Image: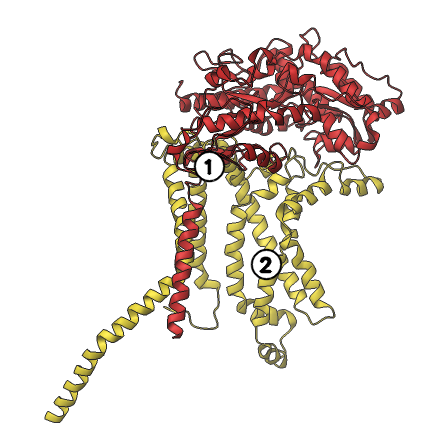
Chain colours: A yellow, B red
Amino acid sequence: MSQAKSTGAIITEQTARMRPASKRRSIKAALEFYLFISPWFIVFVLLGLIPLFYGLYLSFTNYAGFNMDRLKFVGFDNYIKVFTDNDAMYSLGRTMLITCINVPASMAIGLLLAILLNQNVRNIGLYRTLFFIPSIIPIVAVGTMWRSLFTKEGVINQYLVQAGLEPVDWLGYDYAMLPLFIMLMWGVGGGILIYLAGLKAVSKELYEAAAIDGATTAQRFSRITLPLITPVLFFQFIMNIIGSLQIFVQPVLLAANSNSLLSTPIRPNYVYSVHAFQQIFAFNRFGYGLALLWVLFLMILLFTIVIFTTSKLWVFYEVEQEGK
Amino acid sequence: MKKKIWSTMLSVLVVSSLLLISACGGGNNNGASGNNSSKTDNSSNGGEKGEDVKPSGKRVVIRSTMYEPEMTSEMIAEFEKTHTNIKIERVEADYNKLMAMMAAGNAPDIIRAAGVTEVPGYVLKDMALDLTTYFDSSTVFKQNDFLPIVNQFRFDKATGTHGQGAIYGYPKDWSPDFTIYYNKKMFEEAGIPLPSSTEAMTWKELIELGKKLTKKNGEKVTRYGLVYYNGNIAAQQDLLNLQLIQSGASMFSEDFGGSDLTTPVMKELLNFWVDAAQSGVGPSPLHQETDWGGQLFVDNKAAMIIAGYWFSGFLKDNQLTKDRIDEFAVSPAPMMEGGTRISPSASGTGAIISSKTKHPKEAWEVFEWFFGGKPAEDRAKAGYGLPATKTLMNMLPQDTPFNKMNYDFVQNELKYSEGYLKYNPYLTYQAVNAVFDKHFTPVYFGKDTVDGAGQKMTEEINTLINEGKQLIGTN
């Protein structure tokens, strides 16, 4: 008993002696961690976080770009105006419509192309490169290219006229959304890369086992591929929704009157970010424009939370998630 | 040992990132402490002399937003050679960046500004330094030599009158911007007599002429009859403002406190431009283009262009036109039927000095050199725009038949260049453009009427005017 007691005392003594040393080590480790991240973190705080919250503060003022010395606090006026501004609500509706079409369409096309590019065929690397190229071309160049194709005097109408058909006013009221969607679909290459990574991660053994069991191609896709790439689909879904809700440059570049970023897209393509941009940079309503953008941010946040919450029902992870 | 290396590297990283951040921050306005600056003598030598070295030997940095081709690094180096106390730094700043710089207390000293469209707004926003006493005491600027365009940099704050009162800036160069450059060959091909170089056409005649010169393949336009350098052949504030002053009207009230785009004159003009756009005579929301009017003209995709004297310089330099320069000629700005013949500037590009400058004397020294010294002479001799004084006007090039034609033409056109376009000082140029884009574009597509769009534009512009007045504190 006494021997046990003395052994215990020795251990406690040793632990007590070790405690300050381990504490020092952990402080040092923490210090090293913060030192490591500090260059990025300092820049993030100064150029990201502070301007972000400064923007939030300005959204409660009448800031117009030049009146910093006589700034007036306007409470929630700018936020109330968001919901009473017909153009804001209209543009929000158009943005939602574009999102509802663009997200499923771009995901379906992206996945389909990724499946095709996942086949073992000759020169597959070349095809993958070709499909990926559009996503690395600067958006302004892409917009200018599509605009020159779709103008009334553009290349597409030239072919139509040569074929004996009437030219179409692609950038006019009746067809304006079509060039926009074509332009958006043209850039799905970036997503293909992520789908491909997901498809490559699916074990071949599973397909072999399914084939032995007599599963058809469709069954293999629906029972193996699709469930196993749901984490990738989940990621793509969120990113596509965020991207679609923030869509800005494409409608501006396809505007009937496009000559700068302040150009107003034709009414069917008049989206929320364009409205916010115009309030800030054309009308100098900086405070109101910032309120519009914070409302958009909150909407995106809400969508993301809803998707994350429902993801438990349809996203399948091969490994157990931490904290579950 | 390894850990030591790591921690040394990390420390270096942290310190360097902090240095980087502090360097990025404000306060780079001055190359020297502000206290020294006031000791500089207010030399009014047009920038030709510069013995006034600071006692401390430090240089004052004057930041300017003039564009690179206007204020080249060679010009700056030449200035700095003789003005050892001043360093000129060129900064890029569009309107919004400029506002952000002003808000951050980091305003450039010399701000590029268009006398016609921007100066009143800058004055009302307290951004412009009153330069009246500087001009009065200057030996470089002779006020009796000034052309009327200089008045576009005057604004009477008390009465809100543009063109009168204190002077806040000066034009670099300018043009009667609504003259008609045309391609003689295209007229000859169409069997149409060349327009007069002295007698103005009416707007209706101009559009009719444009229609005759327009080439179509079915619905598709292959060559426009008329283009405008700064936008579409459609309802656009520059063209409307010109037609309105020629008719003795305005889209704004006398005190700029309100607007009405539903008046009979306004409706007639709006209908005129809807018809023009629908005819396909020029680019419009119905006939979209990716290039600006000047490019269409040099590409032989347009027969006439509404542009100023500066466009002759563009034609002389352009690879596509410099070897066939004699194919082009110029005709006066069109006028309203029964109206007054006025051929004004649409811009009058120059600069103001920021009211927030910490070095007004040095900024004026640079200003005086750039607008009144050798650079002004060089600009006049090159002929890329009209100078702001009668003396410099004589230096415009006349050495070639094309230059002589432009010179003679402009001497006659100047007789009609005293009228001013009416832009509202409580609105930005971009705001009015955005309102027209948003509400008037549906009219071309038959989705709204001129009356309906006119009403919507009036409401939105009046809201913006009220907001502008409130912000400036005049409401």
| Three-letter code, disc 1 | Arg
- The answer to which quarter of the image holds residue A200 is bottom right
| Three-letter code, disc 2 | Gly
Tag of residue B59 = 1
Residue A174 position (above or below residue B142):
below
Tag of residue A174 = none
Residue B111 position (above or below residue B11):
above
Label 2 element class:
helix
Tag of residue A191 = 2
Residue that extends furthest to the top in the rendered view of this protein: B338
Residue A238, percent from left and from top = 50, 55
Q: Which residue is drawn at 61% across and 53% down?
A: A105
Residue B337 position (above or below residue A91):
above
How far is mark 2 from mark 1, CA to CA?
Answer: 54 Å
Q: Which residue is drawn at 16% across and 82% down?
A: A13
Q: How crowded is mark 2: few (under 14 residues within 10 Å), some or many (20 or more)?
A: many
Residue A21, percent from left and from top = 25, 75
Q: In this view, does B31 lie to the left or right of B395?
A: left
